[in-house]
Image (spheres, grey):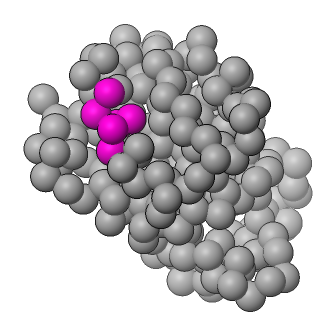
Amino acid sequence: MPIPVCLLTGFLGAGKTTCLRALLAADRDAGRQPGLLLNDFGSLGIDAVLLAASAQVVMLVDGCLCCSLQDDLLLGLLALLDAGAEVVYIEPSGLADPVGLLEGLLVPDVLERCGPLQLLGVTAQGTSPVKDLEVARLWAQQLLLADGVLLTHAGERSSVELGEELRQLRQLGIRGPIAPVSHGNG
């Protein structure tokens, strides 16, 4: 049976790890064995420490999955599949180029073994969190290419504020579902 793979993109502080914790808990509750491939630029690997008890983890450091670590991305994904993962989550660094990630995964070895490849965008707001135009373009691309978007910190906003964030995301051009979530749950 093909194994689903989910890429979670989003900038630092968007809530990816919190959302990932909720997804891993749902998998455990459903009796599925999740695998997790994490990309971190530091040697400490905070996310790996936080999530290691919830899934089989492959940690890739000091590089980017969308460019310099593409071979490692494939090897890590195949290692998780060989270890029995029934669903795989990939959390790249916040500045990951989603096009590079998708291109890196669209190879015969992965396509033969994996089921649906889903891109899930995670954001804490409806506008770019940065002023730099190139980085803001990357933030928008992560969300526009996503199959769905999680708008985090929803419980911290009034209904008017939440409505404005959702309107801004739709204005950006997002066509797929946008789910407001609090603490990773919607």
Vertical side of 166 occupied by 60: above or below: above
Residue at 13% from the left image edge and 52% from the top image edge: 108
Vertical side of 39 occupied by 23: above or below: above
Vertical side of 128 occupied by 109: above or below: above
Residue 160 horizontal/vertical position (percent) = 84, 67
Quadrant in which the N terminus appears: top left
* Residue 76 vs residue 182, the one in the foreground: 76
Asked whether the viewer can see residue 186, the reply is no
Quadrant in which the C terminus appears: top right
Residue 33 horizontal/vertical position (percent) = 37, 17
Instruction: Verify whether residue 148 appears in magenta.
Output: no
Residue at 74% from the left image edge and 88% from the top image edge: 133
Residue 161 horizontal/vertical position (percent) = 85, 66
Residue at 59% from the left image edge and 52% from the top image edge: 63
* Residue 16 vs residue 183, the one in the foreground: 16
The answer to which quarter of the image holds residue 106 is bottom left
User: Horizontal placement of 114 versus 22: left or right?
Assistant: left
Asked whether the viewer can see residue 34, the reply is yes
User: Horizontal placement of 66 versus 163: left or right?
Assistant: left
Residue at 21% from the left image edge and 41% from the top image edge: 114
* Residue 119 vs residue 170, the one in the foreground: 119
The answer to which quarter of the image holds residue 51 is top right
Vertical side of 91 occupied by 32: above or below: above
User: Horizontal placement of 51 versus 24: left or right?
Assistant: right
Instruction: Verify whether residue 76 appears in magenta.
Output: yes
- State the predominant SS element of the stretch in magenta: helix
Residue 61 horizontal/vertical position (percent) = 61, 41
Which region of the structure is painted magenta? 74-79
In the rendered picture of this protein, how many numbered marks are placed on residues? Answer: 0
